[in-house]
Image: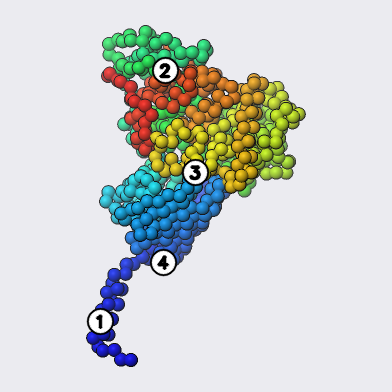
Amino acid sequence: MKFPNSVILFLIITLTACKKEQKQSSLAPYQGNEIYSIIFTGTKVGELKSHISQDSIFIDYDYKNNGRGPTIKETIVLNDEGFPINWNIKGNSTFGNPVDEHYNLNNLKAMWTDATGTDSTMVDSPMWYINQSGSPYSTILTARSLLKAPNYSLEILPAGTLKLTEMESLNISNDSTNVQVTSYALSGADTNPSYFILDDEQRLFAFINPRFIIVREGFESEEKKLRALSEKYSKDRFEKLQETYAHNYNKNVRITNVHIFNPTTLSLSNLSSVVVQNDRIISIDSPTETKDNEVIIDGNNGSLIAGMYDMHAHTGVEEALVNILAGVTSFRDMGNDNDVLTELMTKIDSGTIAGPSIHRLGFIEGKSPYSANIGIIVSNKTEALAAVDKYHDMGYYGIKLYNSMNGDWAPAIVKHAHNYGMFVCGHVPAFSNADDMLKAGFNEMTHINQTMLGWVLEPEEDTRTLLRLTALKRLPSVDLNSDKVQETMALFIKNKTAMDPTLAIHEALLLARNGKIWPGTKDIIDHMPPSVQRSLKVAMADISNPEDDIAYREAFTKIIETLKMMKDKGIFIVPGTDLGGSFFYHRELELYEQLGYSPAELLKLASYDMAKYLDDENLGSIEEGNLADFFLVPGDPTKDIKAIKTISLVSKGGTFYYPTEIYPEFGIKPFTEKPEINE
């Protein structure tokens, strides 16, 4: 059939017009494969791999550090403008919770399913969805959209606003290649910004974090420099917050109309006023007494409590200030990157940034495929003893042993440390049990599960893996009156060994369920940023069948019963979180009420008792001559321990902080009003 020339011309024009209207994929310049190494303090622990084909990105994300880590596969499909229209995420989270997350945009209806359930909304135009369980790779995709957006800012789903901030231009090189890159901060999704680096083609070069980095293959040698860059950005942020919100008055400060908690009588005083000069409490007077040239802060009949101690911290700059705002003015650091911690302590001590006073434990880990990559990693007993020497010479007050350590080395290590007068605590090394560590001379056992696993595991079972968590399903069968349990209790008592149970993290592991608010966060969740709220409605462990659900709940009940028995037998309980402290420290104390502590006893335990335990002079109580570490709450925490969740003022060594001023910087809605201040 022969078409008229006019028809042929019409078809050509139509097809050409259609071709012109078809937009190029936003991923056209990025087709092919990318590989990134995941590195924790110098050790490669996994990889992030991406394959881009047309409008689709296929991602494999897998790493294992300290015997645990996520395994995730993602498929993301973008529209021509670079926004997601289909997103599937499958795998498991760090502690084994199954991941099956989906997002879809169809005719401007956005629908998503994550661990908290299913939701949807109509949108005016495509938006970025902030995933719950995916890899960090989507950061680069989001960044490309933000770089085109007004003020580098976009509203996001399920809620909130993302903001991109350019940090600096850099030149990074390996043995054969120089790369021009730019670093950025991404804020709005969490309480703190995340930091990443793009090359000049807007390809992801690195995702950087003070604890680990994800870097383009071939540039692994730059890991330490890149991690230091992230540390610098975080410290710069917190130095600015300190400049803005730390109040250092040039005259005496008097807090009037306050009840002072007395840890020796477990009671509140009559109304008084407390005067601070520099870093010390110099006077306790009548409630309304004032003198010339004073800053007057109205305590409004509230309660003044000595600063508290989180005894199981892994200090980071991003947690330091929020702990101060929560009344936690002292930390015991249980293991860290030693150089990073030293620098952080220097900045805190100089007042450059806010943070608790820190007591350091030297972390010693055995070398294995399951090693926790911090502190000092050793391959034999001789190296372990040398690590004790090094920590002693560096001024650490004690050491902590970890999972991959050979338990047979423990007696010699403990003896060597004790000869220096150093404190010793730790996990139970794999293929050993708590009784062995108690006999070796541990001063304190770390985590209640580490002790209780000795009652349910077989000798050949490996606790360097997630078994140290999943085996807790066996705890309901434990008879606390059995000979095995009572032998362990007797060793605690005989050796005067303390217990650091980290009860709040066990509550999260055993009682958190997908779609349900974590039990320990019900009082605070509505104050948190949207993404944080979402994260507090996700299970940590794999609790995918009814039998496990029951077993884990009963395991937590057994843990409570065990700790109550320990307390009743006189075993000393040490409050710490391993969850970053702050709000979780409040929950840690709240849970201890189930062990038989009164609220007043908990205030004493958290402050006065811990100061004595660590030999801290001039701390732990509000007295003339003591350091001015204390916090103010409107209510009476001797009657209700939850009152410590509404802090209106904190003094750390005479520097005053008002949480109501600072919480919005973290996207947190304040819990109470700022006190009235007359300067």
Toward the viewer: 560 or 275?
560
Q: CA distance from mark 2 to mark 4?
A: 63 Å
Label 3: how many Cα within 10 Å (few below 14, some 14–19, many 20+): some
The quadrant in which residue 509 appears is top right
Check if mark 2's residue and mark 1's residue have beta carbons within 8 Å: no
Closer to us: 180 or 542: 542
Label 2 with label 3: CB-CB less than 8 Å: no
Quadrant placement of the N terminus = bottom left
Residue 65 percent across, percent down from the top left: 56, 46
Q: Pointer 1: what residue?
A: 10
Mark-to-mark CA distance, 4 and 3: 35 Å
The residue that disc 2 covers is 303
Real-space Cα distance between discs 1 and 4? 30 Å
Residue at numbered disc 3? 515
Residue 144: % across, % down: 35, 56
User: Which amino acid, mark 3?
Assistant: Gly
Q: Amino acid at mark 2?
A: Ser
User: Dot 1: what SS?
Assistant: helix
Identify the element where label 3 is drawn. Answer: loop
Residue 299, image quadrant = top left
Question: Considering depth in this image, is 255 or 612 the residue closer to the camera?
Answer: 255
Question: What residue is shown at x 48% (from left), y 28% (from top)?
Answer: 586
Which one is earlier in the sequence, the residue at label 3 or at label 1? Answer: 1
Of the numbered discs 2 and 1, the one sitting upstream in the chain is 1
